[in-house]
Image (spheres, rainbow, N blue to C red):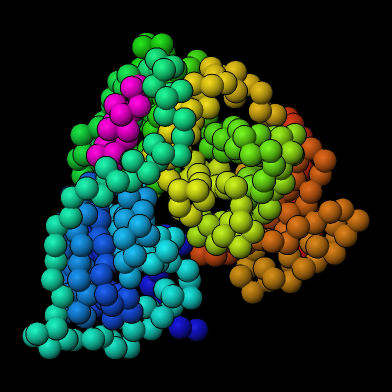
Amino acid sequence: MAQRLFGTNGVRGIINKDMNVQLALDLGKAIGTFMGGRVAIGNDSRTSATMIKSAVSSGLMCAGAEVLDLGLVPTPVVQHYVKSNGLAGGIMITASHNPPEFNGIKCVDSDGTEMPRSKEEEIERLYFTRSFLNKEWRDVGDLRQVSGAVPSYLASIKRLVDADAIRGAGLTVVLDCANGAGAVATPQLLEDLNVRAVTLNCNPQGSFPGHPSEPVESHLKDLIALVKDTGADMGIAHDGDADRTIFIDDRGRYMYGDKSLAIVAEAMVRENGGGTVVTPVSSSMAVEDVVRRAGGEVIYTRVGAPVVSRRMMEVDALFGGEENGGLIFPLHQYCRDAAMTVAKMLEIVARDGPLSMLVDAIPSYCQDKRKLVCPDERKERVLAALVRYYASQRVDTTDGVKICYDDGWTLVRPSGTEPLFRVYSEARTVEDARKRSEECEKVLDDLIG
Ligand code: MG
């Protein structure tokens, strides 16, 4: 097997351990050799951002690429800039929701989407074989600072929502940018849309002093308290590179990403009188329930945002996304788009709100998650036997094995990095979800043994 560098979200590591300037320089050369032409680069707020970005940029220029430095911007701003300016590609220096000691290098394809695996493999081949272009003195690239990428991203978002309805609704929100890149975009968007914003952790700071940058409930206590104290219409939280958005409703309740995914999916399908919504097999059944009642259909994919984006292009989908708050709007761009998600949710609340009412109208499901040890070499055989065991039931093998019930499912996925299966179940009650997991666990135990 070929050596691998890129994980599911680019190349990530701890600074000056597995992520260092030598790696960044060589990877920059490999990417520059692969992409050529004009390449945009941006970064989130991490302390190592300039160090890693400079090394990657040097590598790009060595291979002859022209580097357009967008500065501190959310990931979807790089993607939007690449697509709307016809660039050869883009690079984002970020480790998204990982702790501050991490950083990462993520590639953007020329169409603004996350780079498909096949192209990453080509870059890995160039990297490991050191087949870099080392241009002659007259042909090396240059670097130019570019301003205006954020305003043009926000302008294009505002064109895609009913901005007048939002402006007229007199909404108040509390915004938590986790000291990350969202701080340079979302406050401006809210101001432009005449939304009163109380801000929290909207000073970009690489040590993430406010809270860790993954927008899970335990990190958002201050945001939740402030939503209650101010009587705001919603709370908004981004991850470190602002491609994902998590909401708090007007009653101060943390909303799991599948709720916002379902609310936006239903609204979009209704507005369009039908349409296709694409989401991974691990998403809550609530999404399918509301899309169906609105007259649309759901297509399931393997887990991972790039896979969802590609499938959305193939089926000309109306909307799609993941349950972690990564929502994708094809009319804007085929990637997770945090500020677009904010604008769309504001529009929906301005028209149909309050948000708590919309949340309560989404069918409620409970999930059970567990792990089960299984040696790597047995995984495939066990999964095949599992499909045979549940032959009388509807089984989906898009990603692992998903056993479908009328009111939920059990999903068994082999871990890519550890000798274990992840078993998820969904049902109307916690007890039923647990029962489903336990039953499947027993079957798996027998098959493994
Ligand atoms: Mg992210």
| Relative depth, front residue between 398 and 310 | 310
- What residue is at 82 percent from the left and 41 percent from the top? 406
- What residue is at 67 percent from the left and 46 percent from the top? 275
Name above or below for residue 422 compared with residue 158. below
Split into 4 quadrants, where in the image is the C terminus? bottom right
Rendering coords of residue 380 (x, y %): 69, 71
Rendering coords of residue 361 (x, y %): 66, 23
Confirm whether residue 208 shows in the render: no
| Relative depth, front residue between 445 and 325 | 325
Confirm whether residue 316 shows in the render: yes
**Viewed as shown, does residue 131 lie left or right of 347?**
left
**Viewed as shown, does residue 399 lie left or right of 107?**
right
Name above or below for residue 226 compared with residue 143. above
Residue furthest to the right in view is 392
Rendering coords of residue 329 (x, y %): 51, 46
- What residue is at 50 percent from the left and 48 percent from the top? 331
| Relative depth, front residue between 377 and 134 | 134
Residue furthest to the left in view is 137
Does the segment drawn in magenta span residue 123?
no
Helix, strand or loop for the magenta stretch, by majority? helix
Rendering coords of residue 374 (x, y %): 64, 63
Residue segment shown in magenta: 181-195
Does the segment drawn in magenta span residue 194?
yes
